[in-house]
């Protein structure tokens, strides 16, 4: 099967840095930098799956086989000195999120309760773990999961899926360290 998807991608973060202290180690100047990136685009995922038993499904997917998104990154830096004087600088630049193709293999356990427990492994060793609970005759899906990438902080995600026949709307948020991300997906299955 395949999925054609529209993507609205956003991520950002805030960093605070002490620039100067006095002889008593009191902060006399600090800087706050905020970064926000937003992009939109389209993508195509292709995959196959096999139902091994009524409870166990395995699959193989190429995510973002053909995908492209573009947008902007806005950076705002504010410096405040001991007297409350503020200096602000802002900049905007083009941003293209990394949407290179990713090969993923996975397994899902689907007991009759409507809950799915899944694990996917990417070619770079990134492990995706998740759970999904379908409600209202599968029209609504509640999701939670984690992404464990080699040598990186664990990213936690939560989301909702609205399933109307072949059309699916997915909304999710993620958090890793001090950063956050938001995802919005609209897809049609064929």
Image (cartoon, rainbow, N blue to C red):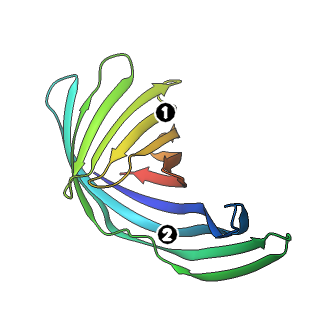
* Outermost residue, top side: 113
- Binning the other alpha carbons within 10 Å of mark 2 as few (below 14), some (14 to 19) or many (20 upward) gives some
Residue 25 in percent (x, y) is at 67, 61
Q: In this view, does 114 lie to the left or right of 27?
A: left
Q: Residue at x 49, y 61 (%)?
A: 6
Give the x, y percent position of residue 137. Answer: 49, 24
- Label 1 Cα crowd, 10 Å radius (few <14 / some 14-19 / many 20+): some
Instruction: Point out the residue furthest to the left here.
Output: 52
Q: Is mark 2 on a helix, strand or loop?
A: strand
Question: Residue at the spot x=21%, y=53% of the render?
Answer: 125
**Dividing the picture into quarters, in which one does residue 78 lie?**
bottom right
Rendered position, 188 above or below 22: above
Give the number of the disc on residue 141: 1
Which residue is disc 2 drawn over? 41
Mark 2 → mark 1, Cα distance in angstroms: 24 Å
Tell me, for residue 51, which label it has, or none.
none
Closer to the camera in the image, 93 or 90: 90
Closer to the chain start, of discs 2 and 1, is 2
- Which SS class for mark 1? strand
Name which residue lies at 53% across and 62% down. 9
Q: Tell me the residue at 26%/61% (across/down).
A: 102
Counting from the top left corner in percent of width and height, residue 119 is at 26, 38
Q: Quarter-wise, where is residue 107 in the image?
A: top left
Q: How many labels does the image show?
A: 2
Q: Which residue lies furthest to the front in this view?
A: 23
Please name whichever residue, 140 or 77, is drawn nearer the observer in this view of the structure.
Answer: 77
């Amino acid at each position: 099967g395949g999925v054609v998807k529209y993507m609205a991608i956003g991520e950002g973060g805030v960093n605070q840095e002490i620039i100067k202290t006095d002889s008593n180690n009191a902060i006399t100047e600090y800087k706050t930098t905020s970064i926000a990136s937003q992009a939109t685009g389209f993508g195509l995922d292709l995959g196959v799956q096999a139902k091994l038993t009524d409870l166990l499904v395995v699959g193989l997917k190429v995510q973002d086989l053909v995908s492209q998104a573009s947008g902007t990154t806005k950076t705002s830096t504010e410096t405040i000195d001991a007297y409350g004087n503020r200096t602000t600088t802002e900049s905007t630049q083009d941003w293209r999120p990394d949407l290179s193709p990713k090969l993923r293999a996975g397994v899902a356990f689907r007991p009759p309760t409507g809950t799915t427990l899944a694990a996917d492994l990417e070619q770079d060793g990134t492990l995706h773990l998740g759970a999904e609970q379908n409600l209202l005759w599968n029209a609504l899906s509640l999701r939670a999961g984690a992404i464990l990438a080699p040598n990186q902080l664990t990213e936690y995600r939560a989301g909702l899926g609205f399933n109307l026949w072949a059309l699916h709307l997915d909304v999710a948020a993620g958090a890793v360290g001090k950063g956050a991300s938001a995802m919005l997906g609209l897809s049609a299955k064929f």
